[in-house]
Image (cartoon, rainbow, N blue to C red):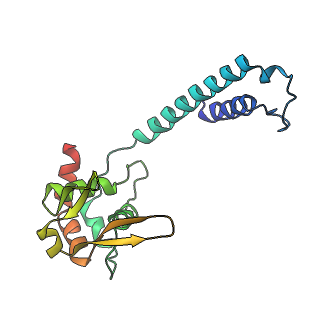
């Protein structure tokens, strides 16, 4: 299936559903056929179906990648931050070491779940939902919570010091074994 052609068709349908001529980009007259309620509903329905198909196609392409499996020797190229950083930044630095474009990326959530599995993080109930927090062992390794306040929101974020980053890299083979089990 030609995904680009499908996206193009979906954009046309969406414009027509919104009463816009897809060729000229102008609003159509109120008495135009595409402004008929039944036709508009049909166009919106077809638009939603096409979006779902496009999303499935995109996910299928991404799922065709080989599982993450970085050779341990590549980790020697990891550049440590002097100051503590988030798990997302650690994972981005690890993913930059990949040379195989057909390999899936390592996910921060997978690393965090592994850290729960090895006892450095734990799941606690917090404000009606669950959150990951460092255990005493995790705190000793330099994992800590920092409360962040922005103009948009307030949240707690975990940060990982040099020792915690080193732990992840030193135990990378165990992380890869954990990922294969999941």
Point out the image quarter for the C terminus.
Answer: top left
Q: Residue at x 78, y 24 (%)?
A: 35
Q: Residue at x 23, y 67 (%)?
A: 169
Residue 122 in picture, x, y percent from top left = 17, 58
Residue at the front extreme, as displayed: 127
Q: Quadrant of residue 163?
A: bottom left
Q: Nearer the viewer, residue 161 or 65?
A: 161
Q: Residue at x 30, y 65 (%)?
A: 74
* Residue 92 showing in the rendered view: yes
Residue 51 in picture, x, y percent from top left = 57, 32
Residue 142 in picture, x, y percent from top left = 21, 76
* Residue 1 showing in the rendered view: no
Task: Say whether residue 103 is left or right of residue 10.
Answer: left
Q: Nearer the viewer, residue 65 or 182?
A: 182
Using the image, determine if residue 56 lies above or below residue 140: above
Task: Say whether residue 91 is left or right of residue 101.
Answer: left
Q: Quadrant of residue 153?
A: bottom left
Using the image, determine if residue 95 lies above or below residue 83: above
Using the image, determine if residue 141 lies above or below residue 127: below
Task: Say whether residue 1 is left or right of residue 33.
Answer: left
Q: Quadrant of residue 34?
A: top right
Q: Nearer the viewer, residue 6 or 143?
A: 143
Q: Residue at x 39, y 63 (%)?
A: 92
Residue at the top extreme, as displayed: 38
Residue 14 in picture, x, y percent from top left = 69, 32
Task: Say whether residue 54 is left or right of residue 182.
Answer: right
Q: How many marks?
A: 0
Point out the image quarter for the N terminus.
Answer: top right
């Amino acid at each position: 299936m030609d995904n680009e052609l499908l996206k193009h068709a979906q954009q046309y349908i969406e414009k027509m559903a919104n009463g816009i001529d897809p060729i000229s980009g102008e609003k159509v007259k109120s008495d135009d056929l595409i402004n008929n309620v039944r036709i508009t509903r049909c166009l919106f329905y077809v638009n939603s179906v096409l979006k779902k198909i496009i999303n499935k196609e995109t996910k299928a392409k991404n799922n065709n990648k080989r599982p993450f499996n970085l050779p341990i020797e590549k980790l020697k190229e990891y550049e440590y931050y002097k100051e503590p950083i988030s798990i997302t930044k650690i994972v981005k630095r690890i993913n930059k070491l990949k040379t195989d474009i057909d390999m899936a990326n390592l996910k921060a959530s997978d690393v965090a779940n592994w850290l729960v599995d090895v006892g450095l993080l734990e799941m606690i109930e917090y404000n009606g939902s669950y959150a990951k927090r460092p255990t005493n062992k995790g705190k000793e390794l330099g994992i800590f919570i920092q409360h962040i306040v922005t103009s948009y929101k307030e949240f707690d974020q975990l940060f990982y010091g040099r020792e915690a980053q080193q732990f992840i890299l030193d135990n990378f083979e165990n992380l890869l074994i954990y990922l294969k089990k999941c």
